[in-house]
Structure formats: C-alpha cells, structure tokens
Amino acid sequence: MIRCMSSDLKLFVGGRMLKHDNIEEESETEPFSLIIPKARTNLVFDRWRNISFSPQQLGSGIVLFKNYLTLMGQVDIVNICQKGAMGPGGFYQPRNPSGDKLRLHMMCFGRNWDPVTRYEKRYRSDGSEPPPLPYEFISLAENAIQDAHPDHQLPPMCPDICLANFYTGTGRLALHQDRDESSDSLRRGLPVVSISIGDTAEFLYGHTNDENKLDKVLLESGDVLIFGGKSRHIFHGVRRISPDSAPHQFNQESMLRLGRLNLTLRQF
Ligand SMILES: O=C(O)CCC(=O)C(=O)O
Ligand SMILES: [Fe+2]
C-alpha cells in the first residue's frame, strides 16, 4: 500500500485531476498512469516479502527482520537500482568534507544527498539529478514499518529519499548518525529503513560513538533493519564486509558484482 501517496491520489488519478465537484479535468503536467498504482504495488510487494518473518527488537525503536525479502525481491531490487544506475545520477564515489573518498559507491533516488552539501543541492556537481524514488521502495519501507508492529515504538514514515550504497569486499562506512533530514522528521523520530542485499556486513550500532561499547549485528542478504523513535540518532557504521558471502543462487540470478548493496529509505 502507498498510504503516504493517498493525498496525491485524491487530486490526480491516472493523470486526471479530480476537482471538488467531481468534474474530472485532464492534467497537462502529471503523467498518465496506465496502471492503478496502489494495486500494482501490493502485487509486487506480495512477491517480495517472505511468508514467515519475525521482527527482533534490538533496542527501543530498533527492529531487525532476518530474511525479510524473497530471492525474487532481492533480484528485483538489484534490477531497479541497475536501471537507475545506468542513467544520469548513477553511482559515484563521494568524498567526505575532508576530501577523502568514501570506501563505497553511492547514488540517490528521489532527492539528492551527499556528504559535503547534505540536502542543500538539488543537482550533483556533474549537473545530474537523482532518478525518481521507485514506488516499490516506498511500499517496501511502509510495509516493513507496519510489520514491525506499533509496540516497537516506530512512527509511520513516507520516504522521499533513498540512498543506495555499494560496498566491495574492502568497503566500509565510518561511524556516523543520520541527522541531515529535516528537523521535523528527526524530532518525530521518523524511521530509517535499511535493506541489505548481497554480501554480509558487520554493522555496528548504539547510543555512543565509542566503538568498543557498540553492539554488532550481521546484516545478510534479504535482511531489513529499521531504526527510529528513540533510536533515530544512534551511531552506526559498517565495520567490514565478508567477501563473497552472498548466497550462490542470489549471485547467479542477480549477477550483482561481488559486494554489498544497501538501501536506506528516509523521509526528509
Ligand atoms: O550500509 C549500511 O548498512 C548503512 C548505510 C548507512 O548508514 C547510510 O547510508 O547512512
Ligand atoms: Fe547511516
């Protein structure tokens, strides 16, 4: 379900603007959708989520779903990313504010973010704009938050940005907090939904930046991790990738380069 799109759908249905008096008026700016977005989204999502899944609470507002995504879901996600990656706004190796290259490749969907200008610039320095946020990703994030149940202290969230990181076997990501989203989003603790595909990552997290005091969890292909509410500001990072640890069948069907793809969906 794309709950967060419902306000848009009231205005634009299949490219037609519905006026208050129920007289339809063709919109000249909105694309005319051939499919009914809501129906297609549910259909796609049912094939992406494993039938049995159980959320594990790792802390207040931190929920891990092991093996949440089917093999088909994981392969579809790679294909959707690949489509975005091949156009303008595809993967590149960003630099941090001190000028060093990050040990990963990154691209954005929906909005632009980079480690130096944060959310300030709509376009990248090469003039490219991120591809739109795929509706399947919105649906995945929404469903995962719902599946985490209200007792896990997670407010609902409607993503408008997805960061995609690709790590090779030597990739890593230093400890940081995700705190560039709007003050409203951060204040409300709107969750970050993190999707792991491919090789396994050693993920560190906790409420301190002292690496020795952090907890560690292995994120494997198909796992989904959510952190929000009281844990929206946790420190986290990827200490290491286990090279060539992705399931054989996934490698064969996705043809993903050796490494790990991670998506984080957020609401600015
Ligand atoms: O790759 C991951 O698991 C984490 C990514 C992350 O923390 C980020 O992109 O901000
Ligand atoms: Fe992060």
Image (cartoon, rainbow, N blue to C red):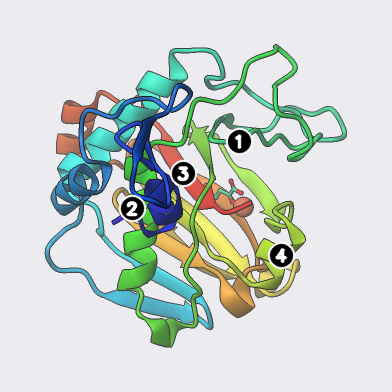
Comparing marks 2 and 4, which lies closer to the viewer?
A: 4
Which residue is found at the position 64% from the left and 51% from the top? 268
Query: How far across and down, in percent of the image, does residue 77 sit?
Result: 31, 36
The three-letter code of the residue at mark 2 reads Leu
Please give left or right for residue 187 compared with residue 82 in the image.
right
Is disc 4 placed on a helix, strand or loop? helix
The three-letter code of the residue at mark 4 reads Asp
Is disc 3 placed on a helix, strand or loop? strand
Q: Which residue is mark 3?
A: 263
How packed mark 4 is, by other alpha carbons closer than 10 Å (few <14, some 14-19, many 20 or more), is few
Location of residue 155 with respect to 267 vertically, above or below: below
How far is mark 4 from mark 1, CA to CA? 17 Å
Please give left or right for residue 262 compared with residue 93 in the image.
left
Please give left or right for residue 232 compared with residue 136 in the image.
right
Image quarter (top left, top right, bottom left or bottom right) of the N terminus? bottom left
The three-letter code of the residue at mark 3 reads Leu
Q: Which residue is mark 2?
A: 140
Determine whether label 3 and label 1 are within 8 Å by CB: no
Comparing marks 2 and 3, which lies closer to the viewer?
A: 2
